[in-house]
Image (tube, rainbow, N blue to C red):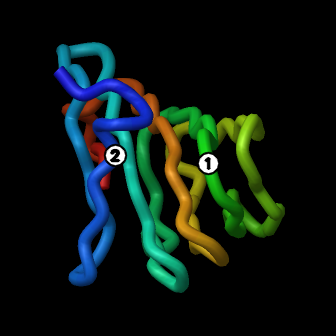
Amino acid sequence: MAVWPDGAAFSEDGPGVTLLDESKELKLVLVGLGIGQALPVHPGPSASFHFLDGEGVMVVGTEEVEVAAAATVVAPTGVSRGVRATSRLVFLGSLGDPTSENGPH
């Protein structure tokens, strides 16, 4: 079992994603992004993103917001979302209905 802060993975090749739990109703991931790395803007199921460390920019729909440790952002089903790290960034992603056609990315 991965636990923050020791469970965050980082990779020079892209986002480090650690699966914490997955069921029919929910997928929980711990994501580590290096400076300049990003999760591209994409649609998905209902999701929340709780930032644990670092700073970045999150896009939800047409809105762009700066995020840092302790920020939480919620994206409704089907609304595009993405994250770009401006410093080393760690967040907890909670994705609803992982098997939906908008499934987690």
Residue tagged 1: 53
Q: Is residue 63 visible?
A: yes
Q: Position of residue 78 (x, y in %)?
A: 51, 48
User: Do the residues bearing badges 2 and 1 touch, measured as CB atoms within 8 Å?
Assistant: yes
Residue 75 on image: x %, y %: 63, 42
> Quarter-wise, where is residue 30 in the image?
top left
Question: Three-letter amino acid code at disc 1?
Answer: Asp
Left or right: residue 27 compared with residue 63: left
Q: Nearer the viewer, residue 101 or 27?
A: 27
Q: Quadrant of residue 99?
A: top left
Identify which residue is drawn at 31% across, 46% down. 104
**Which amino acid does the dot numbered 2 rest on?**
Ala
In the rendered image, residue 66, in percent from the top left (x then y), is placed at 82, 63
- The picture places residue 35, in percent across and down from the top left corner, at 53, 80
User: What residue appears at the point 17 percent right and 20 percent down from the top-left corner?
Assistant: 1
Which residue lies at the image location 61% right of the left edge and 35% below the top edge?
Answer: 50
Q: Which residue is mark 2?
A: 8
Residue at x-position 77% and y-position 68%: 62
- Quadrant where the C terminus sits is bottom left
Q: Quadrant of residue 103?
A: top left
